[in-house]
Image (cartoon, coloured by chain):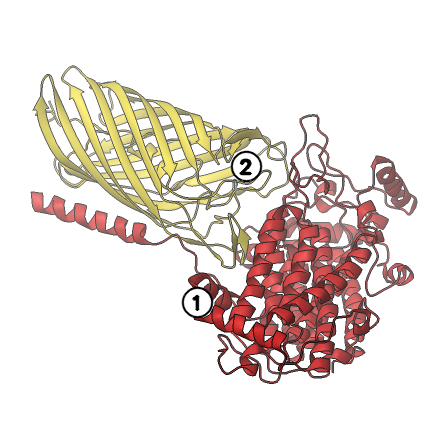
Amino acid sequence: MTKRIQWSTVVLAALLLTGTRTTAQTAFDGFTMSKGELCLVAAYGEMSWTDYWEGKRLRENLNIGKFSSKQFMPMLGYGLTDRISLFATVPHISNSSDAGYMAHLKGWQDLQIEAKVQLSKTKIGKGTLSTFGTVGFSTPVSDYIPDFLPYSIGLGATTAQARIIGHYKFDKGWFGTIQTGYTAKSKIKVDRETYYTGDQFYSNKMAVPDVWDASIRAGFDNKRVRLGIQYNWMLATSGTDIRRNDMPYPGNRMNRESVAITGLLWIPGIKGLAIHAMADQTIAGRNMGKSFGWMAGLQYVFKPFQKKKNDQ
Amino acid sequence: MTNNNFKLAASLGLLALFALAACSKDISQRSLPDFEPSSLEQNGGNWKPILLSSPLDITIPAPEATGSSAYQDELEEIEALQQNLSASDKKAIAKWKNSGIIKWNETARKLVAIYNIPPEANPDGTYPAPNAQNPGAYPKFPFANPPYASRAYAYLQVAMYDAMVTTWHYKFTHNRMAPAANSPSIQSLEPLQDGLPSYPSEDAVVADVAYLLLKVMFPNDTVFLKKESDEQKRAKLVSGLASPSDIAAGESIAAQVVAKVLARYRTDGMGQSGGNPTVWKELEDAAVARGITMPWKSLELPVRPGMLPLFGNVKQFLITTAQRDSLRPPPPPAIGSAEFKTALAEVKKMSEVKSGEVWRIAQLWGDGASTYTPPGHWNEIACEAIVKNNFSELRTARTLALMNMAIFDAGISCWDAKTYYWYPRPSQVDPSIKTIGLPNFPSYTSGHSTFSAAAATVLGYIFPDNAASYRAMSLEAAESRIYGGIHYRFDSEAGTACGDAIGSFAVKKGQADGSN
């Protein structure tokens, strides 16, 4: 029985969970790993913007110029069973801009752990409908500075998220995926003792809005290649707008819609090795940069802890 | 794995999610505890006011006797009000039962934070200026930057102090006690200070001084300010602390004091502090003639005119122009000198530390755009000490007046030095120096250091037990600017020395005001 690894873009989704201006917003996909498989991923991406939404108003800021974020993501995936896989990653992020005199920040961001469970798998018509649920958790691994946006590498919150995924794949390889999730975020501690965002706060704690996100994806998948196009959105469930000509706050209502294309190519001749890439264009937003980002990397899937079955 | 395991895993995950989601987004904030004044300050009417020559500059009618039918009618009105107390009345009583002066100081701080954002450039690269005649148009009036804020706090607190001295004078002249003390059928719904006359009502004075001044400083918020003022007065009426005539007398004092304070406010030179392109060029040329080889330039894009370059000419409270000139710090090191290079290297080194105590201290004292500014920070510190020491409204007013005069004068002297020397920021000399946010005015001397030293000197005089701690805080604030990459050490040191000197003028004033 064919147990080909069908997994690619979870790595990109991880960036979505805690980052605020991350490149990749490829959502959790409809593919799984099989029991005992280990997946190693190394990905690199860049994201940049020159215009951002101050509240709902798109503007430039000559004192920021072009903002750039570079990200390196090592990631680990493991097939606990044929239906449950675990993922973990810690991205390294480096933020800068080409104008102005604000400090640039970089560092290791959040440890993100995800568990993905296949809830059902049903043959329907000329294809198969699979459903999944994921639960995840993230927390900062360094004492990076969350309250210096847009240069902060993350929001500093500990988060928990849950998600459901529906995935229909025709036997001939075309597929569609729809997924949605909710991420709850803790309050954060900042260095300031007093701040104004919507009101005057006498506290060094800031509330970070929760996020509801979703995506719709369509694509083609076979033994050699997987291609997809998708539409993503994320909506903060609370938060303030950046005031005119003010700096952003972690408590801002950060919304984003984007379209992305993703691709994965299995390298012929080296079993389990694939190269993946994606590109993402923000098309609408609130209190965020109108960014374009891309990410590319290598992944290698193998079974270290048990004898390999003969795949074919 | 079995189906049960899935369910278990899913439930655990969902539990974790809901545990986090259940966390409210509400922020618990530090707030001042309830307190009651420990002294009546019976001789407060003899304290020396600041702008008034004496409380007799202000006149109010003598009150009706407690036995008069007019006063008895007032008591009946309060009695009736207390029988129909609304939920909003109860809330208002709780809100205003502590120091009204501190409450209004907090309101002023909040307004400063709201209006402390530099205007965005026009598409043609020029910058719009807020217009007091059309305060609601962008950029809204005012731009409550640190000079503006220091001035607002100072005038507000000076007015409060002169009004409180006047109030105390008339309280102990007329000795008419509060309704709750004069009528057994009126309850005191909040702590009533035994022996403190209520004619005129100090709360009515505070409410109207704040309203009448703040609406000039923050005209867009007139309706909100009026509501607050009315609420404070109503709270005192229904709580049994002040009768309608107590309140009316307070309103009269407030109106008279504010008229005198505004006469100074409108003619102190602030209106000319912005200058114009011709003036800016002259200032730069004058600094170059004094030996500054690299005059300050705005590093903002588009180039933004420096913040209020002539704020240094605004009339001070504590010192004369000649004293200002004699206190002006000596010239900073020549650019490129060994001393300069050492200082610049230190800034560069500290600016690269983006973690730990260095970063924390830089942020803690940053008090930049969209905050209550360094003067606001010191007002918060002062209010905390006032509450701890159970000050009366009169002594609260004195403390905040002395400190805010010192802060305002310190700001003026600092801006005078900034303009006089027109000295470049570290990032202008070495563009690789990144900052916590670069202020748009010359470097020498440091405003934070000057403000903070002045404030700490005054607070150390009033609260001697904490003097060392205030000193340490002011030095930390001075240090924070080096950490933030925006000041040389000599900027901070010269600012601290100047702030100390100005603070000591306020201390001398305090020592001679008859309050001790």
Q: Which mark is residue A261?
A: none
- In this rendering, the answer to whether B342 lies above or below B256 is above
Kindly report the distance in space between the C-alpha atoms of the residues bearing marks 2 and 1: 62 Å
Place of residue B403 in the rendered image (x, y in percent of width and height, measured from the top left): 71, 67
What residue sits 49% from the left and 73% below the top? B79
What residue sits 67% from the left and 82% below the top? B175
Place of residue A142 in the rendered image (x, y in percent of width and height, measured from the top left): 43, 51
Place of residue B504 in the rendered image (x, y in percent of width and height, measured from the top left): 79, 71
> Which sits in the foreground, B145 or B237?
B237
The crowd level at tag 1 (other Cα within 10 Å; few <14, some 14-19, many 20+) is: few
| Label pair 2/1, CB-CB below 8 angstroms | no
> Which sits in the foreground, B391 or B347?
B391
The reply to whether residue A31 is visible in this rendering is no
- In this rendering, the answer to whether B120 lies above or below B210 is above
From the image, which quarter does the C terminus of chain B lie in?
bottom right
> Looking at the colours in the rendered structure, which chain would you say is drawn in red?
B
> Looking at the colours in the rendered structure, which chain would you say is drawn in yellow?
A
From the image, which quarter does the N terminus of chain B lie in?
top left
Which amino acid lies under the numbered mark 1 shown in the image of this protein?
Asn
Residue ID for mark 2: A96
Instruction: Give the side of residue B351 with respect to residue A164, left or right.
Output: right
Residue ID for mark 1: B84
What residue sits 33% from the left and 46% below the top? A184
- In this rendering, the answer to whether B159 lies above or below B464 is above
Instruction: Give the side of residue B373 with respect to residue A135, left or right.
Output: right
The reply to whether residue B174 is visible in this rendering is yes
* Tag nearer the camera, 2 or 1: 1
Instruction: Give the side of residue A5 with respect to residue B210, left or right.
Output: left
Disc 2: host chain = A
Place of residue A62 in the rendered image (x, y in percent of width and height, measured from the top left): 63, 31
Q: Secondary structure at mark 2?
A: strand
